[in-house]
Image (cartoon, rainbow, N blue to C red):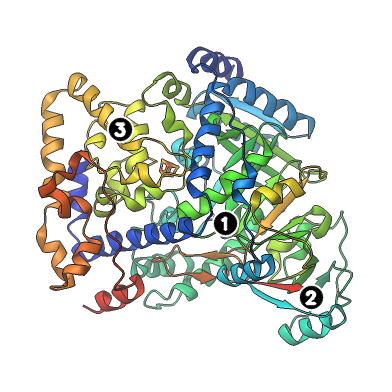
């Protein structure tokens, strides 16, 4: 199904789409506040972008340096060319340790490699321990956002899922009650796990260490309790020096959720005494992306999700409409590189407003790359698919004026919340980046309370 | 094997060498009151913070956590510990800890984070698995931002260390912030 067709399905539930749209825009606003509070924010972005560009231009050297330093510290290093090798390596480590129970913390890479079904087929119990990921796991779905995996679920839906899977009492979706029940359940899983699998936010060449960032503490609960810790990382996660974390950690959480830093930024340099630590370094299409001059910079991505939160199309079409592990603007650049025909509609799921590029902490020229993919697709992919995509995007996702009626006649509210292309369409906003004027008249919580009652 | 083919593909595809940028740290300098900003940010991220006389620490902790029974106190300023731990302690044995009292190495003003390494926590899982976490921190040990913080730990003995900013939290159910996810339910910083 094309992005537009999927988006049409998502748009059937108007109240939910409106909520999704506003919730993500609210996160975007929190990001703005956080960024404005940092002296020399733009300089930080410049530095981060330049460091990443340097990394890509010398990636093999940094990876070898990282490996040597990690080995020195007693960490075992594995290399995987693709998803299949990645899964096989992890399968073998589990076999070697007679492991039956695995806890996982958030890792988009293991999603990309479809690790869970692989392990489950081997008879291994895998539990996703990030609350959002746990919710989508028991719902038998995939994350719809890389930072907020269950943003597409209402609290009532979570309530029902928990009743079924955790035996909770009906609570009308009380977030505190549900979170606490999940905490109790996951505690048991942490304490019984043989192996913990985590992602990697940054891998540091000059120390051979890795940094994992979470708000929930689930990566640490898993990795410090289990006897074996396996961390999976894409080759692009490397940064040259530990001191560079001083740049990236200042940018990451502020861009992601507006927090000044995640609750936990954990630095793993050596396995704990008597324990094992493994790092799996994965290519899975990344070297190919590196070869594409126009799209190479997409490998700068630090997975903050800011481009999704700000994107008028993402907000109104939902992450699942992209049918890819990484949705949203950045996903729409990465996915066509993997399968151009399957993902040919994604580069058209954009107004090219440029908002994604404006917020990206590592300054990826996302909207320009989307435009470049379009040119390739128009040449290389069968025309009917393309035409259908272009026509349908605007039609199904954005051009439903009725959807915007909920705020009554408040023009100021409309101006604030309507995707910019709706506002600027007469001015031909399709090719130009414009910022919405700053208008503060109602915060999300107020909006939320009023609109949930309707 | 994966390793050689990956490295070969990178060599083949990587662009011409681009320089690593010089970081002009002076641009981030700011003439501000570190203590005020730190306090503000600890509260912002859901923690609580109090300046206190060293001799009153235990009294304060008892007042704040009257029901805590299983207590690990690694900070020498507290004698409330009921359970002792050492490097050989099985982390699973800490599953029912009510309260952990540890020293923080230093704090970071811009984000309210404290650095706690294995030196301070002895058992890595302690600051996460404990129900409540109290960190004793010297107010002399504050840095403005993360670049300064990394300077401060650049020559450490590296095993495990963590920046902790507030209690564990999640907003995964309809973006409603809930304090107390998988890690500690609360974080209290006592400044001495
Ligand atoms: S492309 Fe940029 S904004 Fe989007 S997730 Fe990656 S780092 Fe964040």
Residue A261 - label: 1
Q: Is residue B21 left or right of residue A449?
A: right
Reading the image, the residue beneath label 3 is A368
Which label lies toward us, 2 or 1?
A: 1
Q: Chain of mark 2?
A: B
Residue A103 sits above or below residue B1 on the image: below
Reading the image, the residue beneath label 2 is B70
Query: Where is residue A206 shown, x and y percent of the image?
Result: 71, 32
Instruction: Please state which of residues A214 and A371 is positioned toward the viewer in this rendering.
Output: A371
Instruction: Please state which of residues A187 and A35 is positioned toward the viewer in this rendering.
Output: A35
State whether residue A121 appears in this view: no
The reply to whether discs 2 and 1 touch (Cβ–Cβ < 8 Å) is: no
Q: Is residue A258 left or right of residue B148?
A: left
Image quarter of residue B98? bottom right
- Label 3 secondary element: helix
Q: Does label 3 or label 1 sit earlier along the sequence? A: 1
């Amino acid at each position: 199904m094309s992005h537009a067709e999927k988006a049409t399905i998502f748009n059937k539930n108007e109240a939910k789409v409106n909520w999704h749209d506003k919730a993500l825009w609210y996160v975007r606003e929190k990001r703005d506040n956080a960024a404005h509070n940092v002296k020399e924010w733009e300089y930080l972005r410049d530095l981060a972008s330049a460091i990443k560009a340097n990394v890509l231009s010398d990636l093999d050297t940094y990876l070898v340096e990282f490996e040597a330093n990690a080995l020195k510290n007693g960490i075992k290093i594995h290399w995987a060319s693709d998803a299949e090798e990645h899964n096989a390596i992890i399968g073998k480590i589990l076999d070697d340790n007679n492991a039956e129970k695995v806890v996982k913390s958030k890792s988009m890479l293991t999603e990309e490699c479809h690790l869970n079904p692989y392990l489950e087929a081997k008879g291994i119990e895998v539990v996703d321990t990030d609350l959002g990921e746990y919710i989508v796991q028991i719902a038998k779905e995939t994350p719809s956002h890389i930072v907020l995996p269950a943003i597409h679920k209402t609290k009532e839906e979570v309530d029902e899922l928990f009743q079924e899977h955790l035996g909770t009492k009906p609570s009308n979706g009380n977030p505190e009650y549900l979170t606490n029940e999940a905490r109790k359940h996951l505690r048991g899983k942490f304490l019984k796990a043989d192996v913990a699998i985590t992602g990697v936010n940054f891998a540091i060449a000059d120390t051979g260490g890795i940094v994992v960032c979470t708000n929930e503490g689930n990566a640490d609960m898993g990795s410090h309790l289990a006897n074996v810790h396996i961390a999976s990382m894409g080759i692009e996660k490397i940064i040259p020096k530990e001191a560079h974390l001083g740049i990236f950690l200042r940018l990451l959480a502020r861009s992601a959720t507006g927090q000044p830093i995640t609750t936990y930024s954990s630095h793993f340099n050596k396995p704990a005494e008597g324990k094992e630590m493994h790092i799996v370094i994965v290519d899975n299409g990344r070297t190919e992306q590196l070869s594409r001059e126009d799209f190479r910079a997409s490998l700068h991505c630090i997975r903050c999700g800011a481009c999704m939160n700000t994107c008028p199309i993402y907000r109104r079409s939902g992450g699942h409409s992209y049918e890819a592990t990484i949705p949203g603007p950045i996903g729409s650049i990465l996915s066509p590189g993997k399968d151009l025909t399957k993902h040919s509609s994604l580069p058209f799921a954009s107004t090219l407003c440029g908002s994604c590029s404006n917020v990206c902490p590592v300054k990826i020229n996302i909207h320009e790359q989307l435009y470049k993919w379009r040119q390739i697709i128009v040449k290389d992919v069968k025309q009917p698919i393309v035409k259908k995509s272009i026509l349908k995007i605007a039609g199904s996702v954005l051009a439903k004026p009725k959807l915007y009626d909920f705020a009554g006649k408040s023009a100021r509210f409309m101006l604030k919340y309507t995707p910019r292309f709706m506002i600027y369409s007469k001015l031909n906003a399709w090719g130009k980046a414009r910022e919405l004027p700053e208008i503060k008249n109602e915060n999300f919580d107020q909006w939320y309370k009023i609109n949930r009652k309707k | 094997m994966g390793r050689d083919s990956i490295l070969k593909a990178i060599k083949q595809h990587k662009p011409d060498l681009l320089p690593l940028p010089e970081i002009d740290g002076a641009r981030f300098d700011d003439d501000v009151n570190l203590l005020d900003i730190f306090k503000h940010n600890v509260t912002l991220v859901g923690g609580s913070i109090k300046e206190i006389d060293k001799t009153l620490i235990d009294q304060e902790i008892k007042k704040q956590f009257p029901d805590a029974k299983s207590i690990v106190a690694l900070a020498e300023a507290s004698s409330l510990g009921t359970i002792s731990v050492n490097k050989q302690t099985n982390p699973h044995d800490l599953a029912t800890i009510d309260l952990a009292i540890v020293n923080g190495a230093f704090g970071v003003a811009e984000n309210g984070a404290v650095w706690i390494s294995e030196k301070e926590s002895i058992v890595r899982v302690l600051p996460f698995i404990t129900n409540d976490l109290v960190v004793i921190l010297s107010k002399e040990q504050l840095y403005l931002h993360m670049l300064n913080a990394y300077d401060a730990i650049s020559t450490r003995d590296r095993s495990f260390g963590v920046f902790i900013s507030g209690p564990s939290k999640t907003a995964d159910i309809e973006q409603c912030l809930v304090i107390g996810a998988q890690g500690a339910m609360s974080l209290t910083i006592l400044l001495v």
